[in-house]
Image (cartoon, grey):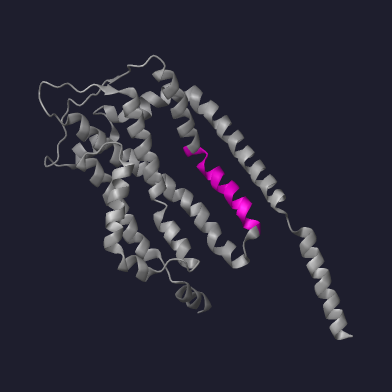
Amino acid sequence: MELEDKSKTEQIEEEEVQEGAMSFWDHLEVLRWALFRSACVLMVIMIGTFIAMPYIFDRFILAPTSNDFITYRWLNAIGGGVVKLSQDFDVQIININVASQFMTHISTSISLAAVIAFPYFIWEIWRFIEPALFEDEVKHLKPAFFGGTVMFYIGCAIGYMLVFPFTFRFLVEYNLSPNITNQINLQSYIDNFTMLILVMGIVFEMPLLAWLLGLLGILKKSFLREYKKHAVVVLLISAAIITPSGDPFTLMLVFIPLYVLYELSILVVRDKRKARKTEAA
């Protein structure tokens, strides 16, 4: 009797699981609506950024072209005479294409809207994958997802405040010959600006990704230490691909944060067995 009752109970549970389980097309439908909601949010924010773009463009995007930029003023203030930037730095951005200003208005509005909507995208991704996770996985991954948002914005801030301004200023002030006058094209400026800032935001997710892979048992601390020399070569190649220009100064400005993040990844990675022992204790 007991065996029959158990078998009946198991059969009922299996039927309930099968009834509650979602098919491939159901998952696809959920994903479709998640993408649709994300696109709608992006569109709404883009309308706002498009309207505000003339104000944002002058006071935010073009700010590093003037010596009044906050990073330049801070460096002059704390330099103590050792580090002193030239006071006549003022770059005029030119446009040589008929439709370039209009297309730049649209592209920068979309890029800024994507940065602002990043937390919502993360939330939609979390909503999509959460039902497939176990309770202990939710416990670890939930703070990691939202921590990744913070790391993304930190990376973007460093890209805007440090990496792009110093890269841009170095390239503009570099003179191969006094007979050559630099005239910076609008498209060139926007490409460098967007690429460096967004890339810095993305690469700051490296320690978080390493931590998650360590929890899942895919990545080990010993592996990162053993292949550090190989990683340096890969990071140099990645920095060369990331940087819009091929100059060594820009390359090092991108490579150094990448290497620091790699070292930080080694520190935060915990082997799966050690993590379990720590939780058990």
How many numbered discs, if any?
0
x, y percent for residue 125: 58, 49
Residue 197 in which image quadrant: top left
- Say left or right for 59 vs 146: left
Residue lying farthest left? 178
x, y percent for residue 248: 20, 42
What residue is drawn where x is 32% and y is 48%? 238
Residue 139 in which image quadrant: bottom right
Closer to the camera in the image, 163 or 281: 163
Instruction: Tell me: residue 80, above or below residue 261.
Output: above
What residue is drawn where x is 41% and y is 69%? 220
Position of the N terminus by quadrant: bottom right
Closer to the camera in the image, 246 or 94: 246
x, y percent for residue 65: 27, 27
Verify whether residue 120 appears in magenta.
Answer: yes
Instruction: Tell me: residue 99, above or below residue 143.
Output: above
x, y percent for residue 113: 50, 33
What residue is drawn where x is 55% and y is 44%? 121
Residue 66 in which image quadrant: top left
| Residue range highlighted in magenta | 115-131
Instruction: Tell me: residue 139, above or below residue 161.
Output: below
Q: Main secondary structure of the magenta part?
A: helix
What residue is drawn where x is 42% and y is 50%? 151
Residue lying farthest right? 1
